[in-house]
Image (spheres, rainbow, N blue to C red):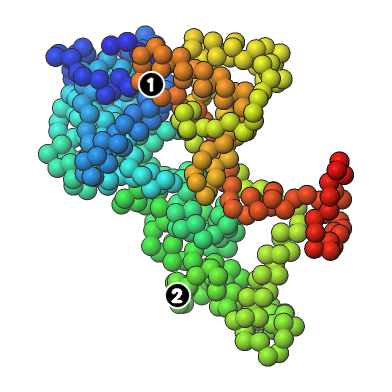
């Protein structure tokens, strides 16, 4: 079976009658492959798996859940995937020797950020154990082990410690999207409650997501701290978990302190003596939000992901035939298209090809701001379609959200003095200057 950037669906092809690789695949054979430079990089392993995600997910939906497996033991590339793993993970992947390899996707193992089923390489060892492996793009993923005869039993995860990225994601999952600037909150929480570093029992592997999550004790402690970040920890009595919403957590503030309590009471009184405490605190919260909005604040970064080129729309009626910047500066669009066809450019890995895309939250349409690069990608997809292949071109994109409020903003934006003044009309629109 041929291998190249144009053929990412090798895992879903029909297997050969006999495995082209000598099995079991042992660690000695893998070492020999590495010495001969016969292995894929971590990024390539990630790309191989993600290229089949859409097809596997479709099969899973078609059969309405459960488990989908595709046997790839008889395909040639998978030993190179094993040989390309990091040193620490490689020996655990090989184990007692690999006898079969397949791709698997199931409802029970989901991506932590998207809450969708996540694909895995599953390697069966000669001693009956199976290892589940999801290589990440920039680092090794988690390894989980199970018995071949008990595929639905509990998973045993490889002993490891979560890094900074894993811990941040764990706090994001615990916050359930209700906390802004989670990284900053996490730092403040650590300084207040974990000045000497995290405890061994602060994090665990999630039961339904392929990621580290907060243990129940740490999650309760985090939410209690959110309710009152300034309250000291009582070593005699552990803080009770707070289960209110973030909209009303200001009401739970401690008003008994000498300095902070006096300041809060003064602020409440200034809102009006007849106002209930809850409404006064809500007014203070809204005033703080308005104050932050009037200040120069760094915008939240857009979400990055892979999109189908076929789904992207142009935002201009026309574009120049010459690039004005980038590696193809001063060159025609056709040269970029030729580079895509020749495999010199990879839309999912070449940083220059990353597109800025605006998603309309009303109808779900995706609009590309980078029209010239999109034109080249569309021509590349057209070339593949005419060549008889069913390959779908994917491109990395920075996805910005566009809401109905943005549309209203543009409809109203006709000021000629940068919003500093407005003229009151007499009920009729002024005639245009050119009439």
Residue at x-position 62% and y-position 54%:
405
Pointer 1 or 2: first along the chain:
2
Which of discs 1 and 2 lies nearer the camera? The answer is 1
Give how far across and how far down residue 337 sits, in percent: 55, 14
Q: Residue 250 versus residue 53: which sits nearer the camera?
A: 53
Which of these two is toward me, 53 or 200?
53
Placement of 43 over or under 202, stated as above or below: above
Decide if residue 276 is in sight here.
Answer: yes
In the rendering, at what x and y percent does residue 392 appear? 41, 24
The residue beneath circle 1 is: 391
Residue 187 appears in the figure? no
Binning the other alpha carbons within 10 Å of mark 1 as few (below 14), some (14 to 19) or many (20 upward) gives few
Of 315 and 133, which appears nearest the observer?
315
Residue underneath mark 2: 240
Residue 209: where, in percent of width, then height? 35, 48
Quarter occupied by residue 162: top left
177 to the left or right of 24 = right
SS at circle 1: loop
How many marks on residues? 2
Q: Residue at x 86, y 56 (%)?
A: 420
């Amino acid at each position: 079976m041929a291998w190249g950037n144009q053929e990412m669906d090798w895992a879903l092809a029909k297997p050969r009658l006999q495995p082209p690789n000598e099995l079991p695949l042992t660690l000695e054979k893998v070492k020999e492959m590495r010495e001969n430079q016969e292995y894929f990089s971590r990024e390539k392993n990630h790309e191989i798996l993600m290229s089949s995600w859409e097809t596997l997910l479709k099969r899973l939906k078609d059969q309405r859940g459960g488990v989908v497996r595709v046997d790839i033991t008889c395909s040639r590339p998978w030993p190179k995937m094993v040989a390309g793993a990091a040193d620490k993970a490689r020996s655990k992947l090989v184990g007692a020797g690999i006898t079969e390899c397949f791709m698997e996707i199931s409802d029970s193992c989901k991506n932590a950020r998207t809450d969708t089923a996540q694909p895995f390489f599953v390697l069966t060892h000669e001693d009956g154990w199976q290892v589940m492996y999801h290589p990440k793009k920039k680092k090794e993923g988690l390894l989980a082990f199970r018995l071949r005869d008990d595929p639905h039993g509990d998973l045993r995860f490889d002993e490891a410690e979560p890094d900074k990225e894993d811990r941040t994601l764990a706090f994001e999952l615990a916050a359930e999207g209700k906390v802004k600037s989670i990284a900053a909150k996490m730092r403040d929480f650590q300084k207040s409650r974990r000045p000497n570093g995290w405890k061994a029992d602060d994090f665990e592997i999630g039961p339904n997501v392929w990621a580290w999550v907060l243990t129940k004790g740490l999650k309760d402690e985090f939410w209690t701290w959110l309710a009152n970040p300034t309250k000291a920890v009582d070593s005699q009595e552990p803080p009770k978990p707070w289960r209110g919403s973030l909209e009303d957590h200001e009401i739970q503030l401690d008003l008994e302190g000498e300095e902070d309590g006096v300041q809060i009471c003064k602020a409440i009184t200034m809102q009006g003596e007849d106002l209930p405490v809850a409404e006064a605190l809500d007014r203070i919260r809204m005033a703080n939000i308005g104050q932050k909005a009037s200040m120069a604040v760094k915008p939240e970064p857009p979400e990055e992901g892979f999109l189908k080129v076929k789904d992207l729309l142009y935002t201009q009626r026309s574009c120049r035939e010459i690039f004005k910047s980038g590696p193809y500066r001063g060159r025609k669009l056709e040269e970029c298209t030729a580079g895509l066809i020749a495999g010199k450019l990879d839309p999912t890995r070449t940083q220059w090809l990353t597109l800025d895309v605006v998603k309309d939250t009303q109808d779900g349409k995706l609009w590309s701001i980078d029209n010239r690069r999109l034109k080249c990608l569309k021509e590349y997809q057209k070339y593949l379609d005419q060549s008889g292949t069913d390959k779908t071109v994917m491109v990395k994109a920075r996805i910005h959200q566009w809401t109905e409020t943005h549309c209203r903003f543009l409809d109203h934006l006709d000021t000629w003095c940068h919003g500093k003044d407005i003229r009151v009309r007499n009920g009729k629109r002024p005639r245009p200057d050119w009439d």
